[in-house]
Image (tube, helix red, strand yellow):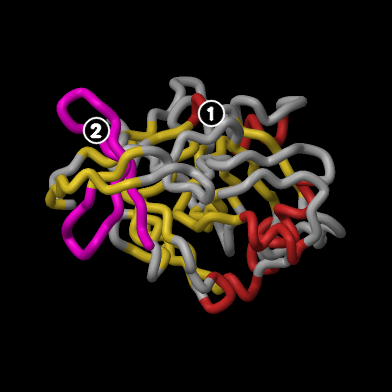
């Protein structure tokens, strides 16, 4: 199934997508929650889609594709390399990425995003898979000069609007046979297969859960393939995961 979160008449609403229609639901769509359909439906085109859930925390994995390691001239890590992103960095689909005035080298990173559906603490990879609710698209926008020269990545990865994700959460997605393509102004900038991941979603969730309790709605950006081109004012970035959707954002002028 596919779920979205949207704004209508000043209120925030969750809905289940069927074709080009969105069926309004009450409650959160996660396992164990009380959910029911209201009987109201809306056309998906034209809805103001928001980021599709409200995470209590955002985590991300660096250096998780061999093609990205080669592009960065880095050696493969022995475990998932995790960093934390503030929730204030979130950006909705079609929202504008704002580049800080003193930024020098901002780049895109199209990624598969893991969405948790159940609490995970000290779980094995097999147990982790049962706690994953679904997947969506993400863009881990990164300022490389700050990433290299600051002591911490708080602004390089966490500036406002640097974490777009959406448009929908898809359950039952076969990520093992999935792929990703990121387009910059209509041209392919990145592509990869999820079979190339050094650490797959179950291993990532298991690893994180040894140290941090993951809650329903928490999200994990799973890494980016290949090279990561720079972006500038007016650029349009599309992260396309077949079977999940297309996350589209423009860089503000």
Between 129 and 83, the one lying in front of the other is 129
How far across and how far down the image is residue 140, in percent?
53, 44
- Give the side of residue 108 with respect to residue 211, left or right: left
Residue 81 coordinates in the image, percent (x, y): 77, 48
State the mark number for residue 252.
Answer: none
- Give the crowd class for mark 1: few <14, some 14-19, many >=20 residues within 10 Å: some
Along the viewing direction, whichever of 65 and 88 lies nearer the viewer: 88
The magenta region covers 1-23
As helix, strand or loop, the secondary structure at mark 1 comes to helix
Residue at 65% of width from left, 26% of height from top? Answer: 154
The quadrant holding residue 210 is top right
Q: CA distance from mark 2 to mark 1?
A: 19 Å
Report helix, strand or loop for mark 2: strand
Whether residue 240 appears in this view of the structure is yes
Picture quadrant where residue 46 is located: top left
Which quadrant of the figure contains the N terminus? bottom left
In this rendering, would 48 be left or right of 249? left
Q: Does residue 5 belong to the magenta stretch?
A: yes
Instruction: Say few, some or many: other residues with alpha carbon within 10 Å of mark 2 (under 14 / 14 to 19 / 20 or more).
Output: few
Instruction: Please give the residue where the numbered disc 2 appears in the rendered image.
Output: 7
The structure residue drawn at horizontal position 53% and vertical position 53%, both measured from the top left corner, is 113
Q: Is residue 32 above or below residue 125?
A: above
* 2 vs 230, nearest the viewer: 2
- For mark 1, what is the residue? 87
Query: Is residue 217 shown in magenta?
Result: no
Locate the C terminus and report the quarter of the image it occupies: top left
Secondary structure mostly taken by the magenta-highlighted segment of the chain: strand
Q: Residue furthest right?
A: 78
Q: Which residue is found at the position 64% from the left and 68% from the top?
A: 67
């Amino acid at each position: 199934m596919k779920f979205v979160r949207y704004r209508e008449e000043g209120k925030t609403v969750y809905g289940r997508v069927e074709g080009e229609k969105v069926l309004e639901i009450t409650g959160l769509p996660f396992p164990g929650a009380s959910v029911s359909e209201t009987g109201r439906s809306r056309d998906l085109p034209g809805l103001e889609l928001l980021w599709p859930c409200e995470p209590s925390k955002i985590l991300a994995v660096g250096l998780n594709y061999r093609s990205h390691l080669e592009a960065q001239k880095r050696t493969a890590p022995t475990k998932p390399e995790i960093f934390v992103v503030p929730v204030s960095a979130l950006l909705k689909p079609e929202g504008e990425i704002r580049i800080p005035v003193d930024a020098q080298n901002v780049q895109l990173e199209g990624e598969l995003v893991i969405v948790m559906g159940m609490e995970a603490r000290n779980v094995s990879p097999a147990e982790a898979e049962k706690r994953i609710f679904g997947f969506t698209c993400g863009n881990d926008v990164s300022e490389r000069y700050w990433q290299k020269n600051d002591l911490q990545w708080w602004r390089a990865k966490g500036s406002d609007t640097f974490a777009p994700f959406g448009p929908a959460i898809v359950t039952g997605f076969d990520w093992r046979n999935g792929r990703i393509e990121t387009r910059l102004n209509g041209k392919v900038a990145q592509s990869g297969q999820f079979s190339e991941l050094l650490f797959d979603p179950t291993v990532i969730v298991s690893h994180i859960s040894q140290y941090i309790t993951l809650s329903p709605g928490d999200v994990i950006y799973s890494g980016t393939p290949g090279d990561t081109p720079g972006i500038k004012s007016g650029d349009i970035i599309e992260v396309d995961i077949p079977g999940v959707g297309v996350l589209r954002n423009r860089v503000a002028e």
